[in-house]
Image (spheres, rainbow, N blue to C red):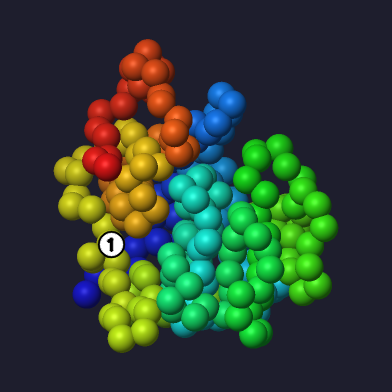
Amino acid sequence: MTENPVPSILSTLRTEQATSPALIWYGPDGERVELSGRVLDNWVAKTSNFAIEELDVEPGTTVQLDMPVHWKSLVWALAAWQTGCLLSLSAAAQAGVRVTAAEPQATAPGELVVAVALPALAMAWPGSLPAGAVDYTAEVRSFADVYTGPAAPAGAGDALAAGPGGTAVPFSDLMAPAAGGPQVLLAPAEAGLTKVLGAALDTWSTGGTVILSGDGVEVPARTLAAERVTARLGV
């Protein structure tokens, strides 16, 4: 079974890729967000510290990621794995924490809901939140940009939680085959979050860059050439 590769990936991002692009997002309305390795690691660290200190997650906690393909979805996935949590991409795994960009109402008794506003410049969730829901967008910036929590447990090789009657998905099954060297990967939202997460982990593990496009966003050929894209994730 593959060990959790995320601590090693984050170490590479903040050292060898500190000032070079690690994640570039093309969203609706022409939105473009570029995160260097250091900046991406800082976002993941803040989110990890937020999850531990505000949500009381611990190794083995299941976190449901109820979000579309987006750069903040990748940040949350990396944070969950850095803290030793299992990630769920559906409600079937009965997670105790649900991170959502949609309706922030609890869907199960005792569920802790975390609301995430997607626009890059958003400073808070747009509108009121139900009692008990947590506004990630408003709070995350106050947390340390260096991860201060415990390391993911040794041997924690499962990435995705199992649903009822199913089995957990290890990192070895989630990650795409090794690219053989650094690449600039275009990952369209239409490929689906599971494939995007696996391909992103593989790309970062070899020092590459992920170009992420939102649902329905067609990145022009001239832009792909300017970004020096060398591979595209199939839909």
Residue 28 falls in which quadrant of the image?
top right
Query: Which of 137/47 is in front?
Result: 137
Asked whether, in this view, residue 41 is left or right of residue 120, the answer is left
Give the residue drawn at x 43%, y 76%: 92
Quarter location, residue 7: bottom left
State the quadrant of the N terminus: bottom left
Q: Secondary structure at mark 1?
A: helix
* Depth order, front residue of 2/221: 221
Q: From the viewer's perspective, is 46 left or right of 71?
A: right
Residue 14 to residue 21: above or below: below
Looking at the rendered structure, the number of numbered marks drawn on it comes to 1
Q: Is residue 75 left or right of residue 173?
A: right
Q: Measured along the vertical axis of the image, is residue 103 above or below residue 208?
A: below
- Decide if residue 47 is on the left or right side of residue 41: right
**Can residue 19 be seen from the camera position used here?**
no
Q: Residue at x 52, y 78 (%)?
A: 95
Instruction: Residue type at mark 1: give it.
Output: Leu
- Which residue was labeled with disc 1? 174
Residue 83 at what x, y percent from top left? 51, 71
Above or below for 220 versus 167: above
